[in-house]
Amino acid sequence: MRTTLTRLADGRELVYYDHDHSPPRTALDRRELPPRPAGSQLRHDPFLDAWVMVAAYRQDRTFLPSTEDCPLCPSREGRPTEIPESDYDVVVFENRFPALAGDEPTWLEPDTGPPGALPGLLGRRRSAGRCEVVCYSPRHDASLVELSPDDVGLVLAAWVDRTARLSAIPGVEQVFCFENRGSEVGVTLQHPHGQIYAYPFVTPRTSRALAAATAYHRSTGRNLYDDVLAAERAAGERVVTENGSWTAFVPHAARWPYEVHLYPNRRVADLTSLSLSEREDFPPIYLDLLSRFDRLFGLRTPYMSGWHQAPVREGREELALHLELFTIMRAAGRLKYLASSESAMDAFANDVVPEAAAERLRALGP
Ligand SMILES: [Zn+2]
């Protein structure tokens, strides 16, 4: 893999991740771009002890443009896009409309305490962190599932490199690489792409997971993720597929109609700790899972997929890297929405029994 770092006209970073045989990337961004938006905030919810990202300018972001106006396609003569080159393999750049941006998070006056203090009752910080866009392919109509294992390997290499680089930014506490696919799950650009959020805090979900894993360790002296993976592999009834390095199963208490968690068989804290063979074994099994998802309903199933990684500075001995892939589709044309119980109470009701979901996914075969 070869990486080429450049800057867009408004100063944002862009990195090409290319196969070794691809041509050099030298094009410059000659667009006239407005200055990057400033002023996004983090607000602390004192009831849940959680941060909320507030960025009003995101209301103006590009919404379902025509193929002609796609900002993620390579640039063409007379039609410059976010990617200055006329071709690319995989490319990552800073989002023009980020929910998170800036260096060290700083407290905003007057309703917060001094730096380093506990959040005030109505705590507010200037935002920090990074939001990046990852374009998987220059082909507008492609989807990750249609890429070759080599190309998915390049996407994985980009995730690994971004995790390492973003984790090194002062103030970044957690890196989340994810993809939303399908307008049903709120995708505003059809071009095959994912995103990366580098949060200046540990997310609520990860905090809860870390508390559970820590409590389990205290009471048993064992690692929760090791034990659950071993138990799922031994039971087998929820395992969808596996290879030499990875195991995919529907979790025992799945929240979504079709939800699969993909774990490396050896526990690691984050993507940067995967071995060469684990990295090589990832593309075939991930492509297999995505293909099964598409064959579930005979259409491009809308899905969400994201890497759970240990935070940068805590929980690295307790949390285990894994990918969570799920669809909100429970039957062809029927979506599960986050309604009151899920949204207001975080209490999920699942209409599909996890063992039945696993059985269906298994039966589809690779
Ligand atoms: Zn496009």
Image (spheres, helix red, strand yellow):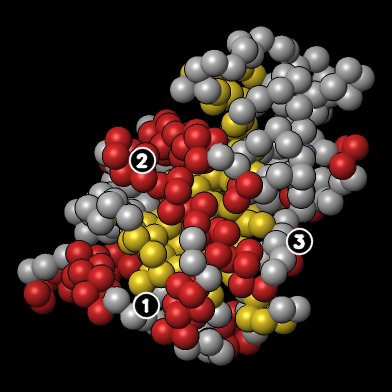
Q: In this view of the protein, which residue sits in the foreground, 323 or 109?
A: 323
Q: Is residue 278 left or right of residue 73?
A: left
3D distance between C-alphas at marks 2 and 3: 30 Å
Q: Quadrant of residue 185?
A: bottom right
> SS of the residue at dot 2?
helix
The label number, if any, that marks residue 238 in the structure image: 1
Q: How many marks?
A: 3
Q: Is mark 2 within 8 Å of ligand 1?
A: no
Q: Is residue 236 left or right of residue 77?
A: left
| Mark 3, other Cα within 10 Å: few <14 / some 14–19 / many ≥20 | few
The label number, if any, that marks residue 183 in the structure image: 3
3D distance between C-alphas at marks 2 and 1: 24 Å
Q: Amino acid at mark 1?
A: Arg
Please report the residue visible at 69 percent of the width from the left and 69 percent of the height from the top. 298
Q: Is residue 33 above or below residue 232?
A: above
Q: Position of residue 58 (x, y in %)?
A: 74, 49
> SS of the residue at dot 1?
loop
Of labels 2 and 3, the one closer to you:
2
Q: Is residue 233 left or right of residue 62?
A: left
Q: In this view of the protein, which residue sits in the foreground, 19 or 169?
A: 19
Of labels 3 and 1, the one closer to you:
1
Mark 3 or mark 1, earlier in chain = 3
